[in-house]
Amino acid sequence: MTLSPRDLVASLLDAGAVRLQPRDPFTWASGLKSPIYCDNRQLLGFPEARGLIVEALVARTASFVPTLIAGAATAGVPWAAMVADRMGLPMAYVRPTPKNHGMGRQVEGPLAKGHRAVLIEDLISTGMSSLKCADALRAEGAEVPAVLALFSYGLPQAERAFASAHIGFDVLGSFEVLSTEAERRGILDASGLAALKDWRSDTVAWSRAHGGA
């Protein structure tokens, strides 16, 4: 079975990995208010969906002909491990920042130098955390052609950030498909859909209008 974008967002909703609350927004770690919260780690508890997601990630990853699979810590690590295992490739993982003890490494695992590494994330929001991980791999001497993720909010700043870094990115499920599926299931009404679109067009302004940073 091929995993379609609708299959992916259906799995996210079924697993409770995505919550939509335009009238009672979530507060992100940054202090921003948001009508959506995504915790893709919930999918690890659903073996059938998990297997289909790994197959889809393997197919997308293979198109970049990698010699190393890297996972962005922490939520990208299990997906990277499963993809690397299926593809028979070495795997590394990348911390947001270097350790402040021991060897002080940011990239753990085999030496990345000379490898063509595909970085796997669970979620892309602004793209900045993914690009920090990609920069760490590049600093180790790896080539990073792309970042792959299960889902993206589709924020304009993410597209600009990846374009500026000259790194491709690909996702299995999109914000647009999620919005359509949520409406079909009756999770969102017309005003809820409008709130999500307003938020995505300007996350900071939307947050401030709802009492956030």
Image (tube, helix red, strand yellow):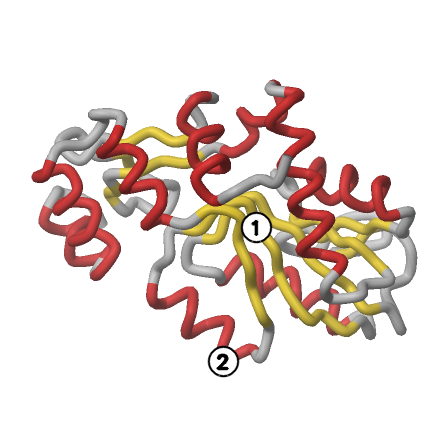
C-alpha gap between disc 2 and disc 1: 19 Å
Q: Is mark 2 on a helix, strand or loop?
A: helix
Q: Above or below — where is 161 with respect to 104?
A: below
Give, as a three-letter code, the residue at label 2: Ser
Q: Position of residue 129 (x, y in %)?
A: 53, 57
Q: In this view, does 24 lie to the left or right of 47?
A: left
Q: What element carries label 1?
A: strand
Q: Is any atom of residue 99 visible in this view? A: no
Mark 2 crowdedness (10 Å alpha carbons): few <14, some 14-19, many ≥20: few
| Disc number placed over residue 164 in the picture, else none | 2
| Disc number placed over residue 149 in the picture, else none | 1
Give, as a three-letter code, the residue at label 1: Ala
Q: Where is residue 88 in the image (x, y as percent from the top left)?
A: 91, 47
Q: Nearer the viewer, residue 140 or 40?
A: 40
At 60% from the left and 73% from the top, the residue drawn is 167
Q: Above or below — where is 26 with respect to 207?
A: above
At 84% from the left and 49% from the top, the residue drawn is 91
Q: Above or below — where is 58 with respect to 40?
A: below
Q: Where is residue 43 in the image (x, y as percent from the top left)?
A: 56, 27
